[in-house]
Image (cartoon, rainbow, N blue to C red):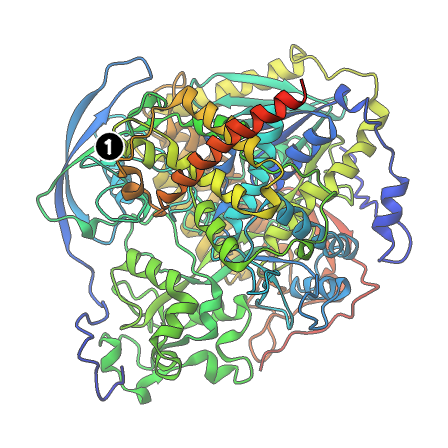
Amino acid sequence: MTVTDPDPREATAARTDPGRTLDVTLKVWRQAGPDAEGHFATYEAPGISEDMSFLEMLDVVNERLADEGVEPISFDHDCREGICGTCSLMINGQAHGPERGTATCQLHMRTFSDGDTIVIEPFRATAFPIIKDLMVDRAAFDRIVEAGGYITVAAGSAPDANLIPVPKVVADAAMDAAACIACGACVAACPNSAANLFTAAKAAHLNLLPQGQSQRYQRTETMVDTMEDFFGSCTNHGECEAACPKEISIDFIATMNKDYLRAKLKNRRYLSRNG
Amino acid sequence: MAVTLDPKVPPGPIDEKWENHKFSVRLVNPNNKRRFDIIVVGTGLAGASAAATLGGLGYNVKAFTFHDSPRRAHSISAQGGINAAKNYHGDGDSVHRLFYDTVKGGDYRSREANVYRLAEVANNIIDQCTAQGVPFAREYGGLLDNRSFGGAQVSRTFYARGQTGQQLLLGAYQALAEQIGKGTCTLYNRTELVDIVNVDGRAAGIVVRDLLTGEIRSHSAHAVVLATGGYSNVFFLSTNAMACNVTAIWRAHRRGALFANPAYTQIHPTCIPSSDEFQSKLTLMSESLRNDGRIWVPERAGDDRSPDQIPESERDYFLERKYPAFGNLVPRDVASRNAKAMIDAGKGVGPLHNGVYLDFTSSIERLGEQTVRERYGNLFDMYARITGEDPYRVPMRIYPAPHYTMGGLWVDYNLETTVPGLYAIGEANFSDHGANRLGASALMQGLADGYFVLPYTIGDGLAPLLGTKPVDTGHEAFARAEQEARDRYAGYLAIGGTRSVDWFHRELGKIMWDHCGMERSRPGLEKAISEIPALYAEFKADLKVLGDDRSLNQSLERAGRVDDFFQLGLLMCEDALQREESCGGHFRVEHQTEEGEAQRDDDEFAFVGAWEHTGEMRSAVLHKEPLVFENVKLTQRSYK
């Protein structure tokens, strides 16, 4: 792009005016507590700027509700940069809404059209009990990590970092898996409420790296067994990968399954040898 | 209360202090560690690494987080990287150089001995995190890659794509999860600290609120560690996560812990400008963008033409014009202040005239779009997602935003506050960054404190307590603090006013940003000092919080946090007013060089300003810890 000869591809000029506003109707799941009965409430949300994020739209709706004496809608959120994994929401039946590879906090209202009705529900899974309105309890994920999603290193005992070379392709693959933000979209999107993508991402991150080999099979076995205590079984629908805001590959599940099978054999052999 | 500020810096040459200190501190033998209870509040880099390490050593640890999981802490948002003086690239780095750069970057307002120790243990952090499986970027030979970062002339920054904070936090979280699984650490999630309890002049425990049930409970221990982060959200709009707050360290301050350098805040120059009144937070983009982007505004105020319609001759590349040597790469504070000056002069761009352009046109011409995409693709995508504009085609718009707070609880060399038994680590303390933090140093400090400093120094405080039990939570000091907390939350609900918590927070944020933000002046600060108590009185009289205090109530949680922000805001202004100099992130318009740079006054202000609480909305008392520089030479910065 030069000033005298504008690039023809540059169809969108830089913005100097405020964007358009939308009038939308929300159908929001309201539930007073874990044991209360829930229902959909309908709220009109006129005059929403297209530049707002989805959660800022909810902030505005909440301020308006409070003005009317209605208790604001509870929803989980924190960093609003798509990295902490706190936000959730099923938006029109899709975990994190319609935009691929995007967490709810990074979804913007320009994705929607004037006059749209937007249905907002919590993530639904038996392992994610509803706390209030749109908030759910995802602590089962922590139980899986506690079961083996780590490499044991006492602080101070590590060798020099460059003593363990890691091929770049391996490090990159481990990073792809480690990008998981534990939001739970994979579980919410899965017809079986399986947590295989979450578990596989953590297992693959650690199992791919040379540092993770000592605990590889023990880790895989305990993590998978704990996962099965809470979540449904994977039947390869692939909905998890489609819903994942970090676009984590379903291939990691295959890797985990292979490791789990080996773990069963190896651990059994180990046990028999040790009486 | 008689306050003595003894930094307890060990004697000896600077490079032997930490080694000597580790030998001279009292130890708790391995079998006795399980006889001690330690409370750790906050599970970010500092808190999770401390809790995991203390648990691993055998202490009984209770870890508290207001998040649903320890992994959500705001450390996760750090993008750039973590510094260490490994000198893997043979470019002349050393512990001493990292120490020197950090003291200089902090504009000579930090404690030398603490910074040296930080530089020393930084290498251990890289080893520790690599062994834990943190997927740092690698070169093709399989060894660790480094990049360079602002304020340094060597490549010493380790990184994991643009998600270094996330990966380091996950490493610490996983280490903590292991200890939780083994039972040495107990996790209390969705639980917020609302008070600190002292008995006989020592920290005895904490009062917490269960965010799901509203229940107020107490926990006692032999020591309490606060790792609760920074307070940039006092400005309402900042790059901090929504829940970041000052409550834990402010409540500690009210209970006797001195608060050091509250006015030292850092403004980051490359954030996406807000798009409307309802903007909830600002998004940071890595400052590495300034390596290839050119910053400009229209020369004429009020020029509303689209940037491609503004000819080269009518643009002002103001950083390149004013600072020919450093150009667009001047330090964060200089870049931020100059952008503000342009916007104040009516030259701001974008729909709200609240940004300056960061233009990649010439880089794309020079390097090709592909190269620019490889360097910054993820940042460009994020920008496009938020603004709906394509930064490959039209210049980005950027504006500075509050980002990090160097101030925090005063701590000695052991990271203990002025309340015995109460420790502060990570961003919650003040100790290592002086008046300005260098890029990629926050992660380093959080993990240094948690993995390698506190686990040694806390033993020294615990050893004499062997054989004692923690104070019973039935003690009347706990009962009293619990009742105060219950009354406080019930009080917010009982006001029944007309304004929301967020409304008050936004108004407070405006005062703080206008008068205690990038530039401070005596008249501005005095105005803020008169306006804050007035707004606070209105908050106490006209606040509206719906719902109840016996179940989850997010507005009620925020009411408590904003209450404390008001009190902190006043102290920040008082601190900024007393510091009649400019240094690092603290810029007083009265104290600048002819070129408009920060002018320090080393004769009068080479001290840590530590404030003692005297009562709500009452003037605090200033105590001074003199700063002595024996290993670095104080110089005036210049970037011409």
Residue A167, horizontal then vertical, whole percent: 55, 58
Is A75 situated left or right of B508 in this image?
left
> Residue A89: where, in percent of width, then height?
28, 35
Residue type at mark 1: give it: Asp
Indicate whether A58 appears above or below B152.
above
Quadrant position of residue B27: top right
Q: Which residue is located at x 49 percent, y 38 percent?
A: A203
Disc 1 element: helix
Residue pictured at 57% horizontal, 42% vertical: B171
The residue nearer to you, when weighing A1 against A216, is A216
Image quarter in which the N terminus of chain B is found: top right
Mark 1 lies on residue:
A67
In the depicted structure, whether residue B249 falls above or below residue B606 = above
Residue most extreme to the left: A115
Q: For the C terminus of chain B, which image quadrant?
A: bottom right
Place residue B318 in its image quadrant.
bottom left
